[in-house]
Amino acid sequence: MKTDLLIGNEWRGTAKRYCLTNPATEERLAEVAEAGEAEVDAAVQAARACLDSKAWRELPPRKRGQLLYRIAELLEQRSPEIAEVETKNNGKPLFESKIDVAMAVETFRYYAGWADKLTGDTLPVSGSFFTYTLREPVGVVGAIVPWNFPLNLASWKVAPALAAGCTVVLKPAHETPLTALLLGDIAVAAGLPPGALNVVPGPGATAGAALVRHPLVDKIAFTGSTEVGQWIMREAAATVKRVTLELGGKSPNMIFADADLPAAVRGAQNGIFYGKGEVCAAGSRLLVEQAVHDQVVEQLADRAKKLTPGDPFDKNTRLGTIVSKRQQETILSYIAAGEKEGARLVAGGKPAKVNGKGYYVEATVFDGAKPGMKIVDEEIFGPVLSVLTFADEAEGIQLANRSMYGLAAGIWTKDVQKAHRVARAIKAGTVWVNTYNFYDPAAPFGGYKFSGFGRDLGREALDNYTELKTVWVGL
C-alpha cells in the first residue's frame, strides 16, 4: 500500500519517515512519510487551488454526489483489505474493524445523497424585495482525527465536507495513518479532482499545529482530547477559523432497579469494553441503583473475567490490544490510582500478553468507586469500568451530571416515562435507552460542556461546512 503523502492527487515522499508498530505483535508494520510544516503548506495550497479553480465546489452537486457514491463503492469493494490494515495498525479485533469500514461506507453514501439537497430559503421580508439565502462551502477544511477509529472518524468529517463543496486536508493520528492513506487512494481512483482531498500523516505538535495555524485553512474539524481541543480554539482565534470539536467523555451508564438486568449487564459490558474502552463515548461510569447493585456487580465481574484479551485476528476475540505501549502505561497508572484511592478491584487490573507479545490490558472493573477519584473523574481511554451506587432517580441524575464532560449517557429501565424524564435531565449530546454504543450516519453526534461543540453525522453536520449568504434583490 501507499505510505507517502497525498497532495494534489500525487504521492509525495519526504526526507523524514517514521516506523509504525503492530501493537499486537510489537513488530514493524510500515514506514510512513512524515509531514512537516512545508508539506502541510503544500497540501493546503493544493486544497485552496482546487477550491479557487471551482473544479469541485462548482461541480454540479449531483455529480459531486456521484463521486461520493463511487468512493463508497470502492471502500466496500476493498473492505476486507481495509479492515485487516485497521486491525494491524490499531489492534482492535477484526470484527470491529469490519464494522468500522461498513459504517464509513454508509457515511459516504449518506452524504452523497445530501450533495444536491443543500438548499436555501426565500424570505418573507417587508418592502419590495426578493430576498433569499444560499448555502456555500466554507472553504478549505483541516480535518484532524484520532487513533481509536481512524477510518470511521475520517469519514465523519471528509464525507460531509466534500458533499458541501469544500476541499479537505486530512491529518490522521500519528499512530494510525494507514486507512486514511487508503481512503486517499480510493478518492483518487474514484475521480476526485486534484486537491479535493489531501492526506498528510504527521505528529500533532508539528503537522497538526501547522494545519490549525495556516491562514488559508477556513475551518478545523477535530476529534480528540479536550486539552488539544482547547489549544485549537486558542490558536484558531488568530485567524478566526470556524471550529467544531468532538472531545473527551466520561459517560454515565445508568442501571435502574426495574431494568432487564441481563440485558443491562450486557449493555454495560459493551459500553465499556467494545473498542477496548478506547472510545470517547465509552460508558466508563456505571451508575447502579442500590437495590440491584450486588447482582449487577457479580454478573458484570463474571463476564469481565471471561473477556480475555486475544489475537485481534482470531474470530473469537472480543478484546484486542491497546494501541500503543504509552497508552497501555497510562491505563495501568489509572488502575493503580484506583486501588490506591480505595476502590475495590473485582475483575482484571493487569497487563496481559498474547503469545508473549502485545500491549494488552485485562477487562477491569472497580466497585465502590466515588466522585473525586481519578478513575471516576478523568477520562482513561481504556477497558476500565468504575461502578457507583445511587439511592433514587434524583441522586442518579445528580451523579450522571457530576462531570466536566457531556458526550453520551445510557439509561436502562422498563419504565418508559422514567426513561424520557431522565434522558431530558442528563446533560449529554447522545442518550441511549436500553442500548449503548450505536451510531448511524443520520443521527447527529457531539457533546455538551467540555466534550465539545458542533455535531458530526446527520444533516446537522452539513451546517459545519457551509456558510449562509443572504441576497436582497430590489424590485
Image (cartoon, rainbow, N blue to C red):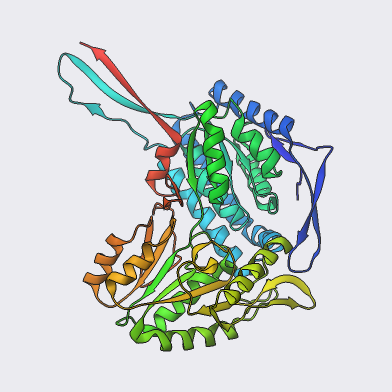
**Residue 133, x across and y down, in percent:** 31, 26
Residue 72 visible in the current orientation: no
Q: Residue at x 54, y 59 (%)?
A: 102
Along the viewing direction, whichever of 440 and 250 lies nearer the viewer: 250
**Residue 268, x across and y down, in percent:** 46, 75
Above or below residue 438? Residue 386 is below
Residue 179 visible in the current orientation: yes
Along the viewing direction, whichever of 262 and 346 lies nearer the viewer: 346
Residue 26 picture quarter: bottom right
Above or below residue 105? Residue 267 is below
Side of 257 relative to 90 (left or right): left
Side of 282 relative to 82 (left or right): left
The quadrant of the image that shows the C terminus is top left
**Residue 227, x across and y down, in percent:** 56, 48
Find the residue positioned furthest to the right.
Answer: 15
Along the viewing direction, whichever of 331 and 407 lies nearer the viewer: 331
Along the viewing direction, whichever of 177 and 377 lies nearer the viewer: 377
Find the residue positioned furthest to the left.
Answer: 127
